[in-house]
Amino acid sequence: MSRRGEVWVSPEIAGVRVPFVVETCEGAPMAGLQTGDQIKIINDETGHEFGSEGGSVPLVERNDNIRSYVMLVLDMSFSITRTPGRQAQVVQGARELVRTILTEQPDLRLRPKVAIYAFGSTAASSLALDFTSDPEMIEATLQTLEKDPGRGSTNLYGAYIKSLEYLEMQAPTGESSLTSRSLVLLTDGVHETGDSERLKSEALSKLRAMPEDGFEAFAIPVKESSAEFDVNVVCELAGEPDRCFVSDPNAIVAKFAEIANRLDARSRSNYVVGICSPLEGPNRSLSIRVMSGGKSGTLQVKYDATGFNLIDCRPELVLNPCRGRTCGVVGGVTCGSCDASQICSEATGACCTRQCSGRSCGPDGCGGSCGVCTEGSECMGNGVCACSAGTIACATGCVNPQADKDNCLACGSVCAAAPNATPACRSGCSIDCVPGYANCDGVVANGCEVFVGNRVPNDGVFENSYGWIASVTGVGEYVGAFDVGAVPVRLDAITVRARSSVGAGSWSGTVVVYDDNGSGGAPGTPLAEVAFSGRALTSDCFTPTEVGIASNVVVSGRIYVGAAFDRTARDDVYFCADQSPSTQLQPAYMRGRTSSTWEYVPGLAFHGGAYRALGFELRAACGR
């Protein structure tokens, strides 16, 4: 007894499925065994049968999920075709074998596929029929061989090697353990075409390389009583003595019939057991014990029960995942295949012909679809995709002409690109500004012409902070220059970065805005002034003070932005300054409010000529 195929485990339903084959000690298949007295499934944890201590009783059935292939290797050399009656005996024997295992096999699932290799000399040997389950095709080939004029001498080993290669190809990757392959060789002579020892060695090596599980070879050496013919040379190609059926010329048909009965019994000796296991965790095992005719055998099977959940486990489902299905794959078990013109319906588990002729979308009649319509189109009742309401058919598909930038209002009407913007269509060509820019003049063609993001003249790293020169008393103010461009913008917010020399606290002051119309381009006309109070202040420059400009202050060109506070009350407050050489120089001024004279910061000596920019930032919006 041995396992035939992989152990199938389903943690979701605590199921274990084990395929196995039962043979006598002599290797003969044992068909028709019954559960109970003849087959017992033992829980190795307890030593008792599954189901005897509660739970579901295992189910054992014949395993029909075996793909069977039979290769008939028939000698058509002159010694067969030119001996009266022998050629007819060979063909009739092959016909008898096909009748037993295929034509008169009532269970369609047990019918094998049969191929025929006819051999003689090397050049004349060929595959007369590829693997098929069609009795009419097989019979037509046998009728042709019945009239074969003969194929010269006997390339026995070459034909044998070639036939094994054809059989090997009938084991799909991952399914070889579920494939039964048999070779039946008939010949009335030994190898005659030369290079005998090398070809014999290759043939026997190839035989030994065939899997023990699921393959067997049979040989029928035909010997006349007076012939000097060593049948052992042919019997070697059967692998086992009990698979060599030496025949006299009149018993050829009977020998084929014996092999046919052996193959039929083999197809019925495959079993499968479905078990609902109460065990959990890895490294579990069960034993399949078979008793018949006073003899017994045991097969131990190891399995992983990690994640098992015994609730709702049904042995019949574990035993036959394909129950009610004729196609598809369930839990790694192939339930069947469909013709090339059909598909397997997952909903019904049956082969189905798709109803998609003249249809490009909608249901295919098999639980699937004939196709999916592209975006903007929908499937009509006739199974044809059409543009949805509000869309038109263009080269790129169905589009909304009110919103498609490549087909704006009409097919092929492309909205043009513009600076600092991406094209858009909103009942006509429009633009979407990239972050930080705005279309302040409302003109699409010139794009988003105004920068409305934060204008930051410094690099964010402040190497120093500035106080006041001696002439500044009372309220002092610092301002830095900003170029906001020719298009008028509205001031939105001003950010000031300052620090305290005595630690964290709060401060109050005023943000200020000046025109640049003062003497020599210095600050001139005041444009805005917004007070703030109680704002957080720390000993570093990382706590900004942002002050919104609520009034409608519209500016253009160059302006000065900064802050003022009473330095007499707060001589601990300093404005942060960027002194990095790579920062572009920002014109800046300082003064006391009581003075009309602005001091040019870059020209002051207290920073040693290192000044580059102040810690002021400006955010703007469209000025309309």
Image (cartoon, grey):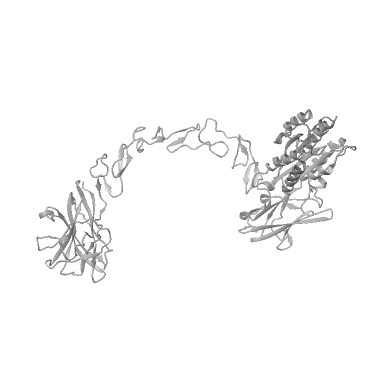
- How many discs appear? 0
Task: Answer whether residue 518 is visible to the viewer in this image.
Answer: no
Would you say 111 lies left or right of 306 here?
A: right
Counting from the top left corner in percent of width and height, residue 393 is at: 41, 32
Query: Which residue, as the protein is rendered here, is positioned at the far bottom?
Result: 502
Where does residue 429 sit, x and y in percent of width and height? 31, 37
Give the residue at x 74% y 62%. Answer: 47
Q: Is residue 14 visible?
A: yes
Q: Position of residue 76 (x, y in %)?
A: 78, 33
Residue 539 placement: quadrant: bottom left
Return the residue nearer the eye: 161 or 303.
161
Query: Is residue 175 depicted above or below 125 in this figure?
Result: below
Q: Quadrant of residue 291?
A: bottom right
Please state which of residues 585 and 152 is positioned toward the viewer in this rendering. Answer: 152
Q: Is residue 391 left or right of residue 609?
A: right
Instruction: Using the rendered view, name the quadrant where residue 49 is placed.
Output: bottom right
Q: Residue furthest right?
A: 226
Q: 348 or 284: nearer the eye?
A: 284
Which residue is rendered at x = 75% and y = 43% of the image? 198
